[in-house]
Amino acid sequence: MIRKINKVLIANRGEIAVRIIRACREMEIAAVAVYSEADRNSPHVLSADEAYCIGPPPSRESYLVMEKIIDTARRCGADAIHPGYGFLSENAEFAQKVIDAGLIFIGPKPESIRAMGDKTEARKLVRSAGVPTVPGTPDAVSDESVVRDFARQHGFPILIKAAAGGGGKGMRIVRSSDELSTSFSAAQSEARSAFGDGRVYVEKYLDNPRHIEFQILADKYGNIVHLGERECSIQRRHQKVIEETPSVIVDDAMRRQMGEMAVAAARACSYENAGTIECLVDKEKNYYFLEMNTRLQVEHPITEMRTGRDIVHEQIRIAMGGKLSFTQEEVTFRGHAIECRIYAEDPVNNFLPSTGTITHLKPSQGFGIREDRGVEVGGAISVYYDPIISKLVAHGETRNEAIAKMKRALREYEIMGVRVNIPFNLFVLNHPKFVEGDFDTHFVNNYYRPELLDGLNPSEQTVAAVVAALLEHDFLEDITTAAGENHTVSPGKWKASRFEHWR
């Protein structure tokens, strides 16, 4: 049965909220934004048809408060809630509360979120469907002796992981028995802090793996398709930084096999809507199920660029009860796409977040370039939220063309007021190992050193050059005027003071 959606409340902020608002507008659906007091003047608030404040800046008092969001949806007459990614997007309790309130949750069923959210249960479920997994403990472990027995059986290194979450939280690589006790306690503590659940499980650690994921879409009628793979091996602290599609190591046969595996994993939990099957791939191209993200992914734009399919449009159609608008046979791939996440962080200083107000912003444009951005000039990068500024995407007919477009776009990108990771992104794109496609998840640890970067971001160099030219122009005018009035001027002192004032 089709249940039409006329108004969607987006339970998120920043670039992903803007992205969803645009999709709603294209489908002639009213879009409602919610915001914390810190986000009052943010782009997602200003671009929505309606906007409502839901609390103070801390997310635990605003974006994570289920009752406030659902109550706001009821009061404004929304038919549905789209959670975006992060915050409550993979919270089964929230999805159920939305449904119980008589609203449509634009995402998977609560039981699917619950099944795939518990990593140990997810592994059991997909194994029953014939999906390969990395050797590991079948259940969460609370006894250190179990971990030691596993290490004796499979050998070091091993990986201790949080059972109730992902994103690198509650994860420890253990390379020897001497590290085991400390790592086990630390993983439990971090998991408890991040997810309110200290359970961990253990699996064999694959040295030098590639991280490859498959985008899937599924409707309520049992139709499931995949939209190809994304290479996500460029990571720091287990967080993705640069993604691309296709992967240089995946040929047509491997893509078909992994795609079938992704569909089987989704079918195992009766999945509906958009999701991602994440895998690790070893040197011999053996692939293993890692986890399923039951939401829209940060990196979904590169898949859209390569397939021409709007994933958010499909999410909304599926949530209304519609069938997928295409079949697997109708999925075609064109060219190569790369995404660089632009973060407000200092790559020279251990990637520490950089807070402040954006005083100048001129993003790159041009053929084959897409940017999903959630901030504008005057916007603040605060301590309360993830410091992502935008996602810059380049699409070309070949990988080399996409890399060239991305490097050009990064060099043209101008932003002032906060430090950004653009120099780091350029470092990666210029590195011979990346250009050759010869890398794995340890690329950053193996090759990146802060001293390899210039002291200024490319955008800062550009603006500094413009300002220097203007100062020089002003100085010449002033020196001419002063000479005509028989005044004595000290050019060096004047220029220095003016330049220091600008800095």
Image: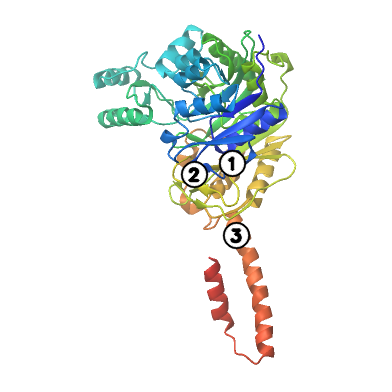
Q: Earlier in the sequence, mark 1 or mark 3?
A: 1
Element marked by disc 2: helix
Q: Which of marks 2 and 1 is nearer the N terminus?
A: 2
Q: Can residue 289 be seen in this view?
A: no
Q: Which of 303 and 447 is in front in this view?
A: 303
Q: How far apart are marks 2 and 1 (CA)?
A: 14 Å
Q: Which of marks 3 and 2 is nearer the N terminus?
A: 2
Q: In which quarter of the image is residue 231?
A: top right
**Label of residue 361 in the image:** none
Residue drawn at (73%, 45%), measured in percent from left and top?
366
Q: Which of marks 3 and 2 is in front?
A: 2
Q: Name the residue under label 3.
A: 461
Element marked by disc 3: helix
Residue 177 left/right relative to 227 = left
Amino acid, disc 3: Gln
> Within 10 angstroms of label 1, few (less than 14), some, or many (20 or more) residues?
many
Residue drawn at (51%, 11%), measured in percent from left and top?
269
Amino acid, disc 1: Gly
> Within 10 angstroms of label 2, few (less than 14), some, or many (20 or more) residues?
some
Q: Name the residue under label 1.
A: 374
Amino acid, disc 2: Ala
Residue 155 left/right relative to 61 = left
Rendering coords of residue 487 (x, y %)? 62, 90
Q: Name the residue under label 2.
A: 38
Element marked by disc 1: loop
Q: Which of marks 1 and 3 is in front?
A: 1
Rendering coords of residue 34 (x, y %)? 54, 34
Q: Nearer the viewer, residue 68 or 272?
A: 68
Placement of the N terminus among the 4 image quadrants: top right
